[in-house]
Amino acid sequence: MHCVSPNQISLHLFGPGTDDPQADRDAVIRYMEDQGLEISGVFGDPSYPEGVAWDATGRGGSGLKIIYATSSTHRGITLHGECSAHPSMQNKVSRDTP
């Protein structure tokens, strides 16, 4: 996890691959749609060589962006969001942070 800019944060998670990248990506797309995200950047084709990721991007309010990539060798998800600009967030997270 790292701050992309003063008020943005990015979290990257990686895991093992799947036997069916298309079904895996499509399940994540359905989940993102159910959460109200706008889906864009959908890539993947049965002609892709083994190990090439099937991708999808979802965008929501407040700067939320989710990028999901899945293949037979790996899976990864990147979450981008906006951090609070409240002064209490400049140096630490506190109980009174909004």
Image (tube, grey):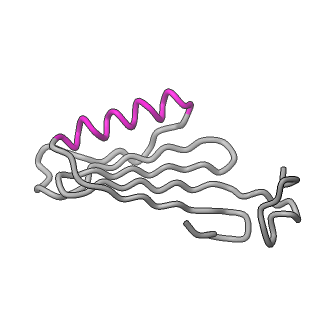
Residue at the image position 11 percent from the left and 48 percent from the top: 47
Which residue sits furthest front? 95
The quadrant of the image that shows the N terminus is bottom right
Q: Is residue 26 magenta?
A: yes
Residue at the image position 54 percent from the left and 31 percent from the top: 35
Q: Nearer the viewer, residue 13 or 38?
A: 13
Task: Decide whether the magenta segment is chiefly helix, strand or loop.
Answer: helix
In the visual, does 83 lie left or right of 65? right
Query: What is the magenta range?
Result: 20-36
- How many labels, in total? 0
In the visual, does 87 lie left or right of 48? right
Q: At which x and y percent is residue 62?
A: 69, 47
Residue at the image position 35 percent from the left and 44 percent from the top: 42
Q: At which x and y percent is residue 40?
A: 44, 43
Q: At which x and y percent is residue 63?
A: 65, 51
In the visual, does 38 lie left or right of 8? left
Q: At which x and y percent is residue 79?
A: 52, 54
Residue at the image position 33 percent from the left and 49 percent from the top: 55
Question: Is 45 located above or below residue 83 in the figure?
Answer: above
In which quarter of the view is residue 23 placed? top left
Q: Nearer the viewer, residue 71 or 42?
A: 71
In which quarter of the view is residue 88 placed? bottom right
